[in-house]
Image (cartoon, rainbow, N blue to C red):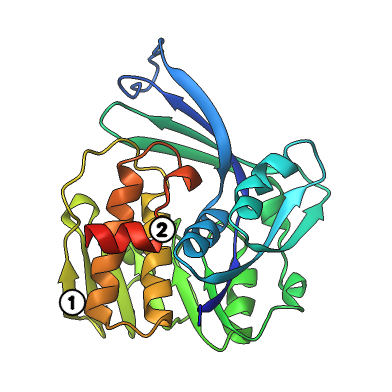
Amino acid sequence: MAPRLTVVGSINLDLVVRPALLPRPGETVTGASFFRGPGGKGANQAVAAARLGAEVRMVGCVGSDAFAAEALSGLREAGVKDHWLPKDAPTGFALITVDETGETTIVVAPGANAELRPNDLSLLPDEAVLCQQEIPAETVARAAELAPRFFLNAAPARGAAPEAELTVVNRLELEALGERRGLVCLTLGADGAVLLEDGAEIARAEPPPVQAVDGTGAGDAFTACLVVSLLEGRTRDEALRRACVAGALAASRPGAQSSFPTAEEVDALL
């Protein structure tokens, strides 16, 4: 039986520019290519989880504007159940630059994502919930209160976050949170990831060698695969190894949601 997961988080439209080199402050770089597509850490993780075989519902906000349908297109194509709420605000945007090595810079204009309120979660299903921090802190806290199983990707970094069955962070995000008990997954980029329980290492994994093309969304593929694998009842060690493979596969392909692998692709590379 497929695991059931509700993602409470952001829905954006990504505007992506691909120069050969990222510009330095004050520098103009020309000759770049451009594309746009659906994104947002919440929507990304919902799509990634659905690609991996989970039954996924998304709770998030879009604007009542012409960009909403495009921002939602990836969720609909992946078969994610809809519970997105139109708000009297612009749809969120992410401005992304990706150089030829796959290195990225990202600036987010949250728009309607900032309007996702705790009372919007009144119809939250009684199932596992995954959140990120591109929505208001009080909404994340309310989701943690309501969910029977709560998972958190504490990105982007901010100083406080509710306790979770699993918290996924990079070094900067862990530093912002401070000491945290329970199960924590520390991501290390190309060096893989480490699982910590009450501060002690219990598992470590490295990604397979791939040619990095675009790191946008790789962390979302990693987080979704780790959570789905745990919901499937896999061991923590196996879940971590599968997550590293999913993140690597996403980084080897252009785009965010378009890069996310299926469960079969993860297992084949594993």
Residue 111 is situated, as x and y percent measured from the top left of the image, at 69, 46
> For residue 95, which numbered disc appears in the image?
none
Q: Nearer the viewer, residue 52 or 98?
A: 52
Q: Give the tally of numbered discs.
A: 2
Residue 87 percent location from the top left of the image? 81, 52
- Residue type highlighted by circle 1: Ala
Residue most toward the bottom?
A: 148
Q: Which residue is mark 2?
A: 262
Up the image or down, 165 lies above or below 16; here it is below
Does residue 49 appear to the left or right of 82 in the view shown? left
**Vertical placement of residue 156 versus 123, above or below:** above
Mark closer to the observer (1, 2):
2
Q: CA distance from mark 1 to mark 2?
A: 24 Å
- Along the line of sight, which residue is nearer the eye, 123 or 235? 235
On the image, the x and y values in percent for residue 201 come to 17, 79
Q: Return the disc, 1 or 2, that comes first in the chain's sequence.
A: 1
User: Can the viewer see residue 266?
Assistant: yes
Residue 29 in which image quadrant: top left
Q: Position of residue 5 (x, y in %)?
A: 55, 75
Identify residue for label 1: 203
Q: Is residue 13 left or right of residue 253?
A: right
Residue 179 seen from this side: no
Q: Secondary structure at mark 1?
A: strand
Q: Residue at x 24, y 52 (%)?
A: 189
